[in-house]
Amino acid sequence: MTDIQSTLQRALASRHAPEARALYLLILKYVDRRAHTTWRNHYRDLLSQDEVEELVAETLVRLMSGALMRFAGDTEESFYAFLRTVTVRTVRESAHRKIRER
């Protein structure tokens, strides 16, 4: 098991441990930055700033409720790519849902 995999396993096993808190704060910071970048570059005319904040929360819930368990990489770069994929998908799905509603 790689270092990233073992860190994730410990964080998922004990969500209230200081190590888990540090990991979740790191994930939050990255997801927030990526969601806002995606919004600014692609969906600014479709989604409001408040909706993007809700999408950040939705992404974190997705990650914490099972998506992190599906991460199978072994490098930091692959972990960030995984987070980026989940975040961009969440923002994109919301924007496309809004387009369909129009």
Image: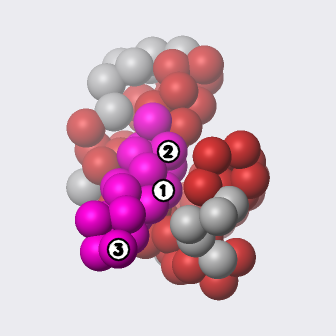
Front residue of 25/100: it is: 100
- Left/right placement of residue 1 relative to residue 15 reads left
For label 1, the crowd category at 10 Å Cα-Cα, with few meaning under 14, some 14 to 19 and many 20 or more, is many
Question: What secondary structure is found at the residue carrying circle 2?
Answer: helix
Question: What secondary structure is found at the residue carrying circle 3?
Answer: loop
Query: Mark 1 is on which residue type?
Result: Val
The earlier-in-sequence mark between 3 and 2 is 2
Q: Give the residue at mark 2.
A: 88
Q: Position of residue 90 (x, y in %)?
A: 41, 55
Query: Mark 2 is on which residue type?
Result: Val
Mark 1–mark 3 contact, CB under 8 Å?
no
Query: Mark 3 is on which residue type?
Result: Arg
For label 2, the crowd category at 10 Å Cα-Cα, with few meaning under 14, some 14 to 19 and many 20 or more, is many
Front residue of 33/95: it is: 95
Q: CA distance from mark 2 to mark 1?
A: 5 Å
Locate the N terminus by quadrant.
top left
Q: Nearer the viewer, mark 3 or mark 2?
A: 3
Magenta stretch: residue 84 in it? no
Q: Give the residue at mark 1.
A: 91
Q: Give the residue at mark 3.
A: 102
- Left/right placement of residue 33 relative to residue 31 reads right
Q: Main secondary structure of the magenta part?
A: helix
Q: Who's the residue at 60% across and 55% down the image? A: 43
Q: Position of residue 81 (x, y in %)?
A: 53, 27
Q: Which residues are magenta?
A: 85-102
